[in-house]
Structure formats: structure tokens, C-alpha cells
């Protein structure tokens, strides 16, 4: 009984159900705000705010940071920051309901936790850089772009997943 | 008619409340679908778990069919919706860099946030990496900015790019997605199971 309960608790949603609800959220977002979802934009705002706090002169003279610093000194993309805070809370609630709250490094048994963390850091740096190049990530460029048939959204989606498949062979020992 | 805030039907002060509510739903759905687990996410690249393919394309289809239908019913003016601009060179190169980042780090920005929320240390390190990546980009921005505007097509949509009506494109994507769902189940049946 105890074991059965434990197995049941870790089960995820049916992917088509999750995808359907996510689609409704995207429709709702466009219907209300006229724009799509985003995720990497919040990280950009965090970096801009941090650099602006530590070295304000540098931030203002830099051509990229200065685009996102408003006159009051707060990063422009505040909408995405509020949305990201909502994501954190929403995910926490879902994890709490399903008994998935646990401080841990998740990795394949074939690699060490340290290796996993090093790869996570490298992957994060690449993803953060790439998302700035493409002006959005899987959420803002690919998913929200596809919802309104933006050509760039489809191109970026194909580039992300196509390259993922091409590179998967070389990284297989980290995962399987 | 929608979009509601740009047309003044909902006052702009509600913008941030709505941002939090949308974020709540977004984060809950991603986590409940298992996207807080990097090993589940990368399953799509090794054939042992196709949740990413199914969630992502179902969401894309529901949203494009829904928005175009709402436009047809005059509930929303689709021409007022923000279309992500297409800069061909940076869309391809940026996507490729993200693809390598995905298979290396096991997350994307939104999913890593859901991992952070439930205590995944690898997701926290990935998120730190994201910020370092943004920082590096910003510091070398002057160096690479000429490249970033190559192949500027503006806010172009697929029907304009291909010269095919939007409804035909959506129908083709729907058929392709259903075929992909069908074949992903066949592949999954043949690939060695991975437990995580």
C-alpha cells in the first residue's frame, strides 16, 4: 500500500494533456497581452540589473545593457521577471503536490554528480548565449513564435532540435 | 476584441498581476509534465522518452489553431499580435548554440526554472550558467552585433515566407505532428528503456 502510493505520486501528466493546457495558456497570454511567453528574458533582466548595480557606468556605456536600462534604472523587461517568479511558484506547488521537492543533483548512474554539474554549467552558458543571439529561447522564440506562425520561430525550433539530435551521439555517455 | 490590454479593454495596471498568473500556470504545467527532470527532457534525443516532442507540438498546434480560429471569429485580431522578428542568420546560429546547450546541460531556460523550484541542484547550476552566457554575450556584443542583423526579414510569418495560406500550413503541421507522435511511440518501443 505504502509502495503503491509512492509509485503513484511520482507519475507525471499525460504529455498530450500537458501540451493541451500549455497551448491554452499561450492562447490566453496572446489574447490578454498581445505577446507570447518567455523565460530567458528574465535571466537577461537579472544580469542587466546586476551589472547596473555593480558597475553602472559600464552598463550604460555597453551597447547591449543600455538597451534594457530605463530612466528609472529598472530593467525594461519587468513583465518577464514577474512571469518567471510565477513559474517558480507554480512549479514549486506542482512539485509539492506530487512529493517531488528534494534537494539533489539528478544524473545518470554512469556519471558522477560533479560531472553532471560541470556539464550543466557549460550547457547553461551556451544556452544563455544562444538565446541572446536568436533573441529568445525555446519559450519566447520557438514556442510563442510558432503560435503566430513566425518564420523565425520555426527556424529556431528546427535549429535547436536538429542540432540536439546531431550532437546527441557525442554526449550519449552523459545520459544513457 | 483581443488582445485585451493593447486595446485598452483591461487596464495596463493589471499587466503584472496577469504576468504572475500566467507564470504560475506555465510553471505548474511544465513541472507536472515532468520538465523539471533533465533526464526526461533529453529522452527525446535518445528515443526513450518523447514527452518533449508531445507536449511541445501539442501546445504549438493548440495555440496556432486556437489563435487563428479566434481571429476567424473576430475575438482577436491576429495582426495585432507580436510576431517574433526573423533575422535568418542569428535564428539559425543561435538555435544551433542552444541545441548544443540543451544536450550538454539537459535543460532550457523555462524548464531549468521549474527544476530550481523543486530543488534540483543541476538546474540551479544551469540557471547560473544562463546568466554567465548572457553576460559573455553582452560583453562581446559590439564584436558580433553586425552578424546579428544579417538576413533581416522583419516580423514575417510562414504564410508570407512560403506563399501558402495560413490554414493550409497549420493543417500540414497538424498532419506532420500526428505522424511524429505515431512514429515516436514505435521508436520508443524499440529503444532500450532508461529509468530515472
Image (cartoon, rainbow, N blue to C red):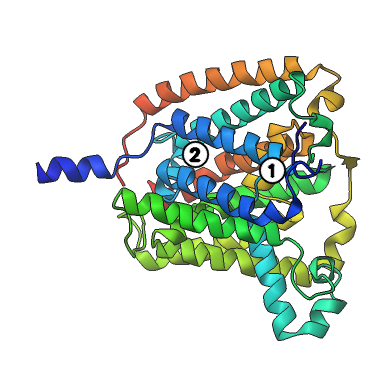
Residues B86 and B14: in front is B14
Would residue B112 be seen by someone viewing this image from the given angle? no
Does B126 sit above or below residue B79?
below
Q: Quadrant of the N terminus of chain A?
A: top left
- Say which element carries label 1: loop
| Dot 1 and dot 2 within a common chain | no
Above or below: residue B36 compared with residue B160 = below
Residue occupying the point 45% across, 30% down: A17
The chain letter under disc 2 is B
Which residue is painted at 84% across and 77% down in the image?
A60
Q: CA distance from mark 1 to mark 2?
A: 26 Å
- Asked whether the beta carbons under mark 1 and mark 2 sit within 8 Å of each other, the answer is no
Q: Position of residue B110 (x, y in %)?
A: 56, 52
Q: Quadrant of residue B192?
A: top left
Residue drawn at point x = 56 percent, y = 39 percent: A165
Q: Which residue is mark 2?
A: B45
Q: Depth check: give the residue in front, B19 or B62.
A: B19
Write down the quadrant of residue A84 in the picture.
bottom right
Element under label 2?
A: helix
Q: Is residue B26 visible?
A: yes
Percent of width and height locating residue A67: 84, 66
Q: Is residue A122 above or below residue B7?
A: below
Q: Tell how many labels.
A: 2
Residue A36 is labelled as 1
Percent from the top left, x then y, of residue B46? 45, 38
Amino acid at each position: 500500500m505504502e509502495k503503491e502510493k509512492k509509485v503513484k505520486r511520482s507519475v507525471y501528466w499525460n504529455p498530450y494533456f500537458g501540451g493541451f493546457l500549455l497551448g491554452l495558456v499561450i492562447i490566453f497570454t496572446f489574447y490578454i497581452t498581445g505577446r507570447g511567453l518567455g523565460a530567458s528574458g528574465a535571466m537577461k533582466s537579472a544580469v542587466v540589473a546586476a551589472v547596473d548595480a555593480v558597475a553602472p557606468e559600464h552598463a550604460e556605456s555597453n551597447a547591449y545593457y543600455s538597451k534594457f536600462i530605463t530612466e528609472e534604472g529598472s530593467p525594461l523587461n519587468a513583465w518577464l521577471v514577474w512571469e518567471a517568479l510565477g513559474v517558480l511558484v507554480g512549479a514549486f506547488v506542482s512539485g509539492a503536490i506530487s512529493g517531488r521537492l528534494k534537494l539533489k543533483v539528478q544524473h545518470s548512474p554512469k556519471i558522477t554528480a560533479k560531472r553532471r554539474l560541470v556539464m550543466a554549467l557549460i550547457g547553461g552558458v551556451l544556452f544563455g548565449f544562444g538565446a541572446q543571439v536568436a533573441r529568445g529561447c525555446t519559450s519566447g522564440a520557438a514556442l510563442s513564435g510558432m503560435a503566430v506562425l513566425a518564420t523565425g520561430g520555426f527556424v529556431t525550433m528546427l535549429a535547436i532540435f536538429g542540432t540536439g539530435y546531431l550532437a546527441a551521439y557525442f554526449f550519449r555517455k552523459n545520459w544513457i | 476584441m483581443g488582445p485585451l490590454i493593447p486595446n485598452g479593454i483591461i487596464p495596463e495596471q493589471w499587466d503584472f498581476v496577469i504576468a504572475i498568473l500566467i507564470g504560475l500556470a506555465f510553471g505548474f504545467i511544465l513541472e507536472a509534465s515532468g520538465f523539471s527532470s533533465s533526464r526526461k527532457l533529453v529522452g527525446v534525443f535518445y528515443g526513450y522518452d518523447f514527452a518533449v516532442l508531445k507536449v511541445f507540438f501539442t501546445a504549438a498546434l493548440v495555440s496556432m489553431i486556437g489563435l487563428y480560429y479566434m481571429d476567424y471569429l473576430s475575438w482577436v485580431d491576429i495582426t495585432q499580435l507580436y510576431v517574433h522578428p526573423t533575422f535568418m542568420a542569428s535564428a539559425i546560429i543561435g538555435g544551433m548554440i542552444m541545441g548544443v546547450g540543451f544536450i550538454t546541460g539537459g535543460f532550457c531556460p523555462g524548464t531549468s526554472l521549474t527544476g530550481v523550484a523543486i530543488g534540483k541542484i543541476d538546474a540551479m547550476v544551469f540557471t547560473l550558467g544562463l546568466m554567465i552566457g548572457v553576460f559573455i554575450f553582452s560583453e562581446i556584443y559590439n564584436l558580433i552585433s553586425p552578424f546579428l542583423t544579417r538576413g533581416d526579414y522583419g516580423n514575417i510569418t510562414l504564410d508570407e515566407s512560403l506563399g501558402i495560406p495560413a490554414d493550409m500550413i497549420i493543417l500540414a503541421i497538424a498532419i506532420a505532428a500526428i505522424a511524429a507522435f505515431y512514429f515516436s511511440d514505435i521508436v520508443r518501443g524499440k529503444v532500450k528503456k532508461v529509468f530515472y
